[in-house]
Image (tube, grey):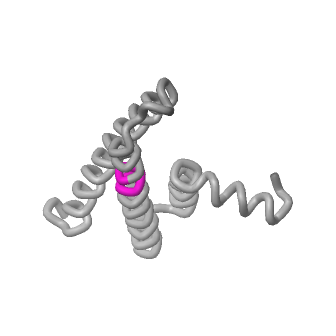
Amino acid sequence: MEDSAWRKTGYKMAIIGLIGTVCDLIENTLLIMMTFDPQGFPDSWAIAHSILATIKFTLWGIQAVWIIWADIRLLKKDIISKKPFLAAIAVIASQHWPTPLTALGLLLGTT
């Protein structure tokens, strides 16, 4: 169990989350700099901002899909119960997909 593929992949997912967080930090710094001087903000920094945002959302998306996949596998093997599984899915959804969830809520008339 110590050297399982799931555990090794889990470590990689944790590192992916940290890399995404660093990209988010740099992206937010560039956004703040952009608000201070929007006219003088270098185009290269704007491109860097877009690239960092794309990397961040891609990494976080990969991580979220892996977490859901791992939870489903654990649920099928009866390693975890249904209640923590649903809580994990709710946390992932609230952190990674607030805009689509809000849009879905608007479409369904719940928000």
Is residue 57 visible to us here? yes
Tell me which residue sits at (39%, 32%) in the image: 29
Prevalent SS, magenta region:
helix
The image quadrant of residue 44 is top left
Residue 93 forms part of the magenta stretch: no
Q: In this picture, which residue range is highlighted in magenta? A: 51-56
Q: Is residue 33 above or below residue 49?
A: above
Q: Residue furthest bottom?
A: 76
Query: Where is residue 54 drawn, in percent x and y?
Result: 40, 56
Identity of the residue furthest to the left in this view: 3
Residue 92 located left or right of residue 7:
right
Residue drawn at point x = 19 percent, y = 61 percent: 8
Q: Is residue 51 left or right of residue 38?
A: left
Residue closest to the eye, 79 or 41: 41
Quadrant of the rendering where the N terminus is positioned:
bottom left
Task: From the viewer's side, name the closer residue of 75 and 15.
Answer: 15
- Count of labels in the image: 0
Measured from the top left, where is residue 10 in percent x and y? 27, 58
Q: Residue furthest right?
A: 109
The quadrant holding residue 40 is: top left
Does 61 sit left or right of 12 as displayed?
Answer: right
49 and 95: which is toward the camera: 49
- Residue for point 57% across, 56% down: 97
| Nearer the observer, 105 or 45 | 45
Q: Residue furthest top?
A: 36
Residue 79 visible in the shown view: no
Residue 55 horizontal/vertical position (percent): 35, 56
Q: Residue at x 54, y 58 (%)?
A: 89
Q: Is residue 95 above or below residue 32?
A: below
For this view, does 88 lie left or right of residue 33? right
